[in-house]
């Protein structure tokens, strides 16, 4: 799919994130001289066609006081992974959850879930909650703790600053 000049303006206007207002699309529309409906329609079309993969919140967990952040990794039964992943992803303390192929023999994990807490003890308690939810479908698990926050950026167009 090709994008036109207006799509490019929308992408540029939202590359640093949507404004934190009650009507973020309306505010972007005001910046660009468009209607809120037009911005939403265009962004939805770009998402459907794959130009935009998703619109998501990317909070700074450290600023929220959640300084213990661990990527939990799980070896779950393949025939249950999608269903279990949806349940894990729905937990309030999981910011993102996804499936990835295993890299056997060194990496048996196929389900990943980012857990957040105020300290590691809180994250470990939440990991125990996930383990209970997974039950007998879980054959192994581990956790990789964050040591620093990486810079998060919005969508950038190739060849643009």
Image (cartoon, grey):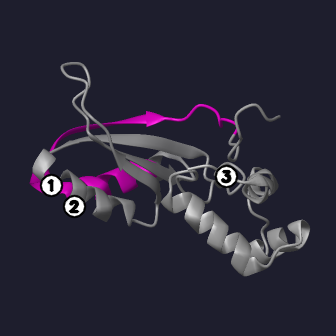
Q: Is residue 76 visible?
A: yes
For marks 1 and 2, give the CA distance: 6 Å
Query: Which residue is drawn at the image coordinates 67% and 52% (left, top)?
Result: 3
Query: Which residue is drawn at the image coordinates 58% and 53% (left, top)?
Result: 52
For marks 2 and 3, give the CA distance: 35 Å
For marks 3 and 1, give the CA distance: 39 Å
Query: Which residue is drawn at the image coordinates 61% and 46% (left, top)?
Result: 67
Q: Are marks 3 and 1 in contact (CB under 8 Å)?
A: no
The mark nearer the N terminus, 3 or 1, is 3
Looking at the image, residue 60 lies above or below residue 20: above
Question: Residue at label 2?
Answer: 83
Nearer to me, 119 or 156: 156
Q: Could you tell me which secondary element the residue under label 3 belongs to?
A: loop
Magenta segment boundaries in residue numbering: 123-151
Looking at the image, residue 68 lies above or below residue 91: above
> Is 87 placed left or right of 158 in the picture?
left
- Expressed as whole percent of the image width and height from the top left, the position of residue 128 reads 30, 53
- Expressed as whole percent of the image width and height from the top left, the position of residue 74 reads 26, 42
> Is 8 placed left or right of 142 in the picture?
right
Question: Residue at label 3?
Answer: 3
Nearer to me, 69 or 118: 69
Which mark's residue is nearer the viewer, 3 or 1? 3
Nearer to me, 157 or 134: 157
Q: Residues within 10 Å of mark 3 (few under 14, many from 20)?
A: few
Q: Is residue 146 shown in magenta?
A: yes
Q: Are marks 1 and 2 in contact (CB under 8 Å)?
A: yes
> Is 49 placed left or right of 23 in the picture?
left
- Expressed as whole percent of the image width and height from the top left, the position of residue 111 reads 29, 44
Question: Residue at label 1?
Answer: 80
Which of the numbered marks, if any, corresponds to residue 93?
Answer: none
Looking at the image, residue 133 lies above or below residue 23: above
| Quarter holding residue 44 | bottom right
């Amino acid at each position: 799919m090709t994008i036109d000049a207006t799509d490019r303006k929308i992408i540029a206007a939202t590359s640093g994130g949507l404004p934190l207002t009650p009507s973020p699309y309306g505010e972007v529309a005001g910046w660009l001289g468009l209607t809120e409906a037009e911005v939403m329609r265009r962004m939805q079309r770009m998402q459907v066609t794959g130009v935009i993969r998703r619109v998501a919140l990317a909070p700074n967990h450290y600023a929220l006081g959640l300084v213990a952040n661990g990527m939990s990794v799980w070896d779950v039964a393949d025939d249950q992974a999608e269903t279990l992943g949806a349940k894990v992803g729905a937990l309030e303390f999981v910011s993102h959850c996804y499936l990835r192929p295993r890299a056997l023999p060194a990496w048996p994990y196929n389900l990943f879930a980012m857990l957040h807490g105020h300290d590691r003890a809180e994250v470990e308690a939440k990991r125990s909650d996930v383990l209970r939810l997974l039950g007998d479908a879980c054959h192994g698990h581990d956790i990789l703790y964050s040591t620093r926050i990486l810079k998060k950026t919005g969508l950038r167009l190739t060849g643009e600053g």
